Every structure is written in structure tokens, then in C-alpha cells.
Image (tube, rainbow, N blue to C red):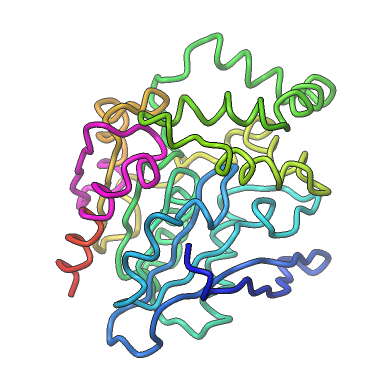
Amino acid sequence: MSNSSKDKYFLWQFSPEDEAKIRYQEYGPDDTGKPPLLFIHGYGAMLEHWNRNIPEFAGNYKIYAMDLIGFGKSQKPNVRYRLELFAAQIEAIMKLKGLDSVIIVGHSMGAASGIYFAHHMPEKVRALILANPSGLFGDTMDGMTNVFFGLIGSPVIGEVLFSAFANPVGVSQSLLPTYYNQNRVDLKLINQFSQPLRDKGALHSYLSPSKRPQDFRLDNLPKPSNYKGNAFLVWGAEDTALPPQKIIPEFQELLPQAGAFIIPKASHCIHHDDHEAFNKRLGYILKSLE
């Protein structure tokens, strides 16, 4: 990502008792006449995971990207992490920057957070561009997977497993299955994902999806959702965790207006796995919104 954009922080008081320091960056000209873009990363990631995408569009759009609370360089307090909290963070940065509406470009958990926000505040969203969103899983989690997540959720075993995976080797093993082009999982990316795991409080945020999986699901939203605006699904064909043929129909029940575009040689981290194909599709979508 360009060095011209520097880290910025704001102190977010997200409850009467709790606050957290949130990192964000902004790019591009202020007066474009177009709605700004807000990039939201997925589970375990950070704003640098968009480093192959944001520079492509920063010349023509005002762009914001932030580290979700509990991830990247944002603070990691011991609180209840959930889609509702991340959606509130979207609202917070929009208020901070005086934004009436945004185009949300979200990946995985970040995309699910965008959907949750759009459902509750549809007037604030110009469009949803959703890269391999999580939150609806169909029958893709088999019995053994559910047992594994149950083990992680137990306090003692969860902490042991966190210690085992919170290092470059564990991170590498976790990232590789989310990429089709596995040469993209290089030392730079591994270190990028490893660093936040050493931060104070990382245990709380990183284990939260397995301790309270329902807090990260969209099953409780009505189908269709309250959001009736523009929505686009972009999916990696080789995503084995969230296979498009099973998951896309579920999201189209939630967002029946959403078309789906599948990129052949890409897996779950589609925007980084095959950034050229993803950027081409993102550019096409953005032009269609003008």
C-alpha cells in the first residue's frame, strides 16, 4: 500500500464503560463527486490486507479503511465481540468523518458486518460489495468441525490452541487453505498476520467467533433483509470453507437483489488471492453505480 497514507487513530467510546483506540487510514481526493468507499477486512486480518486493491482506486475515490476493534493495530479490549459491535464501529467512523453514506467493500467477517450495518441503517449505505462474505454457513460445517469449534470455545483448551497457532508457523498453516495461489502466502503476509496476535488482549478477539459463534452469524436477520439497495457478491470459486454453490443461494435469500460473480482461480481471500480479477470486477461495479 502507498506510503503516502499514514496511520490515524480515534478513541471510540462504544459503551458507557468501554472505549478503544481504533486505527484507520484514508486515501484519495476529498471532492470526487462520488460516494466514498469504506474497506472492511475479514477475521484475523487488518487494513493492509487490501494493499493490492486500494491503490487501484485511490486516484478516483475517497477511500477509508480501518482495523476492526480487536484486530490489526486497533485496541483489543476484553469485551463481547460480535457483528453488532463491528457495525457500530462503521457508524462511528462515518460520524467521525461526516459521511452521509458509503459504498462498503467488505471481505468475509467484514462483509457480514457490512450487511448487519446495512440492515439496521439502510439509508447510510450506497452499495454493498461483498467478497466471500461469512455469516451464513448452510450445512458446510460437519460434525467434527463443530466439535473442534466447541473445543476452542472451552477456556482452557481454547487458550492452549491459541498459543499453538499464534506464531508464524500456525499463521501460515491457517492462511494457506484460504488461498488458491499459495505463493501469495509469503513471509511478509505471514508476519503481517502474526504481529497482532502478540498484542495485549488478542486472545479475547481471536477466540470470540468460536466461543460465541451465533454472535457472528446473520441467521437472525429477516429474509429478505431491510436493505434494498445495490448489492454485489464476488466469490472465489475455490473457497472450500464457504463453497459458492452452497452459500450464494443463502445470501441471495437475504439480499435477493444481489447478483453473483465468481472468479475461477481464487479461494476465500479472493481480493488478495487474485487481485487483478477482483479489481477488474470492483471497477466494473463502481462504474455501474455512477
Q: Residue at x 78, y 66 (%)?
A: 19
| Of 58 and 234, the residue lying toward us | 58
Pinpoint residue 226: horizontal percent, then vertical percent.
35, 58
Question: What is the number of callouts on the image?
Answer: 0
Tell me which segment is drawn in magenta: 252-280
| Of 234 and 216, the residue lying toward us | 234
Against 35, is 286 above or below? above
Residue furthest bottom in the image: 31
Against 132, is 119 above or below? below
Q: Quadrant of the C terminus?
A: bottom left
Pinpoint residue 270: horizontal percent, then vertical percent.
35, 41
Q: Residue at x 40, y 87 (%)?
A: 30
Answer left or right for 91 relative to 193. Answer: left
163 inside magenta stretch: no
274 inside magenta stretch: yes
Answer left or right for 140 relative to 200. Answer: left
Pinpoint residue 27: horizontal percent, then vertical percent.
45, 75
Quadrant of res 280: bottom left
Pinpoint residue 138: horizontal percent, then vertical percent.
38, 25
Q: Residue at x 80, y 64 (%)?
A: 18
